[in-house]
Image (spheres, helix red, strand yellow):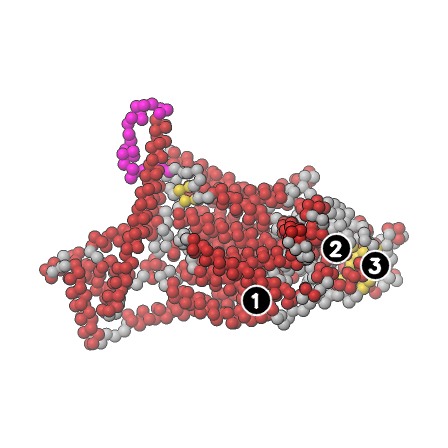
């Protein structure tokens, strides 16, 4: 990875901007094609939003409809109509940073530029722009890892071709991940940039800017999505385990990890302040592990400094064992601290009892992995289609196109190259070929004698004979073709000056570093000797006389951390040399070029130059073991595991896979034959463009299996607005109750954020209407929540168990003792039940009005009243 110049940066910015605007227009057109939103009225537009999307748009609408931004901002601090009758500080409880930013700019645009701009249109444009940022970062990320512009383009086009499988931003534009993932992706991309700079510069510069940028990205992601903390937790674990296998000097990696962990801590603090003290951010794995990472790295740095002051090198194996023990201790403490501290603070009343997101997600994992009964709400969340597993057909389509096709093509090319070499090595030699061989050898012998001015009498010299044999081996690698031999020799002669120039630049850089360190050490010694006495100051040490012996000490500038001089003195210990795979890839022409193009002294000089260059600047094959590429690949594996478990998170693996796909083979197989790699990649790319690429894009614009929601929700919303009081309190299914609040502005008692403990309890009481409990118990539960109107889904009131995700089946698992009774809502639809009156019904939903408590007092609790009717 070379440092890009200004023209390269501008070209990447121009190409990335083109992809940015292309993607924005792409998703905008797809969303309009599927919804025809421009032709809908306000009620129909808002009815398209379901679950928590409708809830967050209600917050945005409250901000946008106010006279100014700050009026709505103050109203969100005290909201009583989403968890009636409790007052909720929305800024503290929910992830509303996207709504705050969008509403702020909406008021600016409406006041100064376009007074007629629509709130929903402006909001959706903001969503499309965030999607464009994701594609821009994907292009830059792919170009960074592949070190080729085609790698970035390949990743972008792959993302667009398979967009319909996972990244369905046009189906749920207001989903929290659409706002948070661009910041997560930016943080990952910038982390790889910082790691790459450390590896190639052997310095850690711009430390303050790095901490600020990564803290900002981390805070924005935490304030936009509840899963952000878990994703950052996996990143920290990968970085913690990667430092022990890294070849970067100890002081350099310690300085970087200190800044890295500090950025997570500052990002958490910034998110906590901006969310008005969201206590949920105080008990995340990300915060605890980043804190312990900071402490571990600090201890490592102190041990390293102490060992250097004592004058002996630290044992690397002992240091790694020490770090491994601390990492295991960190995980143990982090796992115990989360639950213990949370329970203690809950009992003390310091933390709100609504905080329970981690417990909810752990229950989901236990339900999926162990198939155990973990509660009604956890089972209900597990049956959400967004949390279902990825279908094998879709997974195979992605694997076949992005993995099977490229690797099969690469395998064919590698087999063809192998059989070609094998055929040439075992081909029989005819009499004419023997004659051509002798003629070519004579030509080479004449050129060698003329070039080196060697007589036949000097051929007895072993060094001269050795050089001549290398020339013969070069001729043999060219199939004894004298013309090919001359071309190979001329090409290799042209490649020598850049290698020598790089070698001289490396020598100058190392010499300047040695002198810089020696000057600083002289100043430090001068200051120290003034305090101890003039006698010691007047006696120069051997290191002052010979600056070549200076690299045993180390000095750090205030704004940067430089390479350990010990690694400069012995660079082969710092970075790995060329691997055995590189030696196998080199042809015999490359191996024997030095002996045929110059004398023996020039050969030794080039040998020293190439070895020094390989130790200072890592080769491409060595870069696959570097931390920035290792992190990206391991992060993709973690994302893949998460995506296979939860369908909603599969877009993480898909996006990261588009970054990694065009880089793996180039780093492993095609280091010496990059043109072959990109030719094969282009062939696979063009084949995938038509099938399944264009098929998927056509399916996005003209879906064959897509149909608009036919649940007739609009008629029920119109009835609520016309026939109920403005302060009537509603409850109902989590997928539509927030839509009822958004469109009718009626207070509700439950919503779709089931990871909140208090909301989980409320939802279980509301869903008791689908159970087999007695009517008196169900009424009492609803009366405690002060529900006046209860919305039920008629499709769930069939009194039959169709599958494991049927609400009646979930209740039977929770309450097996009630299985002898009929389902309450089924009886409620077909019979008159005291205290419950059906006031509205269509094909999908019904509305039940709850009577006062005075009617319920006369009911018997030991017998279901509907059974006696």
The image shows residue 470 at horizontal and vertical percentages of 22, 61
Above or below 531: residue 545: below
* Side of 674 relative to 284 (left or right): left
* Side of 724 relative to 287 (left or right): right
Q: Quadrant of the C terminus?
A: bottom right
The image shows residue 750 at horizontal and vertical percentages of 74, 53
- The answer to if 548 sits in the magenta stretch is yes
Provide the residue designation for mark 1.
Answer: 394
Q: Residue at x 67, y 57 (%)?
A: 117
- SS at badge 3: helix
Which circle marks residue 741 in the picture?
A: 2
Q: Main secondary structure of the magenta part?
A: helix
Provide the residue designation for mark 3.
Answer: 723
Category of crowding for the residue at label 3, using alpha-carbon neighbours closer than 10 angstroms: few (below 14), some (14–19), many (at least 20): few
Q: Separation of disc 2 and disc 1 at Cα?
A: 36 Å
Q: Quadrant of the N terminus?
A: bottom left
Q: Residue at x 30, y 63 (%)?
A: 587
Category of crowding for the residue at label 2, using alpha-carbon neighbours closer than 10 angstroms: few (below 14), some (14–19), many (at least 20): many
Q: Which of marks 1 and 3 precedes in the sequence?
A: 1
Q: Which of marks 1 and 2 precedes in the sequence?
A: 1
Task: Look at discs 3 and 1 and give the one toward the viewer.
Answer: 3
Q: Are marks 3 and 1 in contact (CB under 8 Å)?
A: no
The image shows residue 827 at horizontal and vertical percentages of 82, 63
Of all residues shown, which one is farthest toward the left?
Answer: 457
Q: Residue at x 31, y 26 (%)?
A: 537
Residue 837 visible in the picture: yes
Above or below 535: residue 90: below
Residue nearest the observer in this picture, 423 or 468: 468
What segment is highlighted magenta in the picture? 530-554
Q: Which of marks 2 and 3 precedes in the sequence?
A: 3
């Amino acid at each position: 990875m070379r440092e890009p110049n200004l023209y390269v940066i501008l070209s990447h910015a121009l190409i990335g901007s083109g992809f940015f605007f292309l993607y924005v227009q792409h998703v905008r057109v797809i969303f309009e094609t599927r919804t025809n939103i421009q032709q809908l009225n306000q009620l129909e537009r808002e009815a398209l939003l379901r679950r928590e999307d409708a809830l967050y748009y209600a917050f945005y609408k409250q901000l946008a409809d106010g006279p100014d931004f700050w009026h709505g901002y103050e109203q969100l601090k005290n909201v009583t109509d989403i968890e009636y009758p409790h007052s909720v500080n929305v800024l503290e409880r929910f992830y509303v940073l996207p709504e705050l930013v969008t509403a702020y700019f909406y008021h600016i645009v409406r006041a100064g530029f376009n007074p007629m701009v629509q709130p929903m249109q402006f909001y959706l444009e903001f969503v499309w722009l965030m999607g464009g940022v994701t594609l821009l970062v994907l292009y830059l990320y792919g170009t960074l890892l592949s070190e080729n512009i085609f790698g970035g383009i390949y990743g972008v086009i792959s993302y667009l071709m398979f967009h319909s499988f996972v990244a369905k931003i046009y189906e749920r534009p207001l989903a929290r991940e659409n706002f948070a993932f661009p910041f997560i992706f930016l943080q990952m991309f910038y982390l790889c940039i910082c790691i790459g700079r450390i590896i190639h510069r052997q310095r850690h510069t711009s430390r303050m800017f790095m901490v600020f940028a990564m803290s900002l990205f981390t805070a924005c992601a935490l304030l936009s999505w509840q899963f952000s903390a878990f994703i950052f937790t996996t990143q920290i674990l990968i970085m913690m385990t990667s430092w022990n296998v890294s070849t970067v000097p100890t002081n350099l990696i310690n300085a970087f990890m200190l800044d890295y962990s500090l950025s997570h801590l500052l990002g958490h603090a910034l998110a906590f302040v901006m969310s008005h003290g969201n206590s949920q951010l105080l008990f995340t794995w990300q915060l605890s592990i980043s804190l312990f990472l900071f402490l571990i790295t600090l201890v490592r740095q102190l041990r390293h400094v102490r060992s250097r002051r004592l004058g002996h090198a630290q044992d690397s194996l002992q240091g790694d064992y020490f770090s491994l023990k601390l990492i295991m201790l960190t995980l143990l403490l982090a796992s115990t601290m989360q639950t213990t501290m949370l329970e203690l603070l809950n009992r003390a009343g310091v933390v709100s009892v609504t905080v329970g997101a981690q417990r909810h997600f752990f229950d989901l994992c236990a339900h999926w992995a162990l198939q155990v009964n973990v509660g009604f709400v956890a089972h209900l969340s597990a049956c959400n289609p967004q949390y279902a597993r990825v279908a094998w057909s879709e997974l195979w389509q992605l694997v076949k196109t992005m993995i099977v096709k490229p690797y099969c093509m690469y395998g064919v090319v590698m087999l063809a190259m192998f059989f070609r070499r094998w055929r040439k090595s075992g081909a029989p030699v005819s009499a004419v070929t023997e004659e051509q061989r002798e003629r070519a050898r004579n030509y080479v012998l004449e050129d060698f004698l003329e070039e080196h001015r060697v007589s036949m009498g000097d051929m007895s010299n072993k060094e001269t004979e050795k050089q001549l044999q290398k020339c013969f081996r070069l001729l043999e690698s060219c199939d004894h073709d004298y013309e090919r031999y001359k071309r190979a020799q001329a090409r290799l002669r042209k490649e020598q000056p850049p290698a020598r120039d790089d070698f001289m630049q490396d020598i100058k850089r190392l010499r300047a570093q040695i002198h810089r360190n020696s000057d600083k050490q002289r100043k430090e010694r001068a200051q120290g000797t003034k305090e101890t006495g003039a006698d010691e100051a007047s006696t120069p040490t051997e290191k002052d006389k010979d600056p070549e012996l200076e690299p045993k000490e180390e000095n750090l500038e205030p704004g940067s951390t430089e390479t350990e001089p010990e690694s400069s003195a012995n660079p082969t210990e710092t970075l790995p040399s060329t691997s055995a795979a590189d030696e196998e890839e080199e042809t015999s022409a490359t191996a024997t070029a030095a002996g045929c193009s110059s004398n023996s002294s020039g050969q030794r000089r080039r040998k020293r130059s190439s070895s020094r260059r390989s130790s200072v600047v890592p080769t491409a094959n060595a870069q696959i073991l570097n931390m920035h590429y290792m992190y990206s690949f391991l992060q993709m594996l973690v994302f893949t595991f998460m995506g296979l478990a939860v369908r909603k998170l599969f877009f993480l693996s898909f996006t990261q896979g588009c970054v990694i796909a065009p880089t793996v083979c180039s780093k492993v197989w095609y280091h010496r034959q990059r043109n072959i790699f990109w030719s094969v990649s282009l062939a696979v790319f063009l084949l995938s463009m038509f099938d399944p690429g264009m098929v998927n894009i056509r399916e996005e614009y003209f879906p064959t299996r897509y149909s608009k929601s036919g649940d007739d929700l609009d008629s029920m919303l119109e009835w609520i607005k016309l026939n109920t009081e403005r302060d009537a309190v509603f409850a109902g299914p989590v997928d539509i109750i927030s839509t009822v609040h958004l469109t009718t502005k009626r207070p509700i008692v439950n919503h779709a954020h089931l990871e909140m403990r208090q909301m989980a309890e409320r939802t279980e009481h509301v869903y008791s209407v689908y159970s087999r409990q007695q009517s008196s118990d169900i009424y009492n539960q609803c009366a405690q929540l002060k529900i006046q109107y209860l919305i039920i889904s008629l499709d769930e009131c069939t009194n039959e168990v169709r599958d494991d995700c049927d609400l009646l089946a979930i209740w039977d698992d929770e309450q097996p003792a009630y299985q002898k009774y009929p389902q309450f809502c089924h009886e409620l639809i077909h019979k008159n039940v005291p205290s419950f009156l059906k006031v509205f019904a269509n094909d999908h939903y019904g509305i039940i009005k709850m009577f006062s408590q005075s009617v319920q007092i006369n009911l018997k609790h030991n017998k279901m009243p509907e059974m006696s009717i």
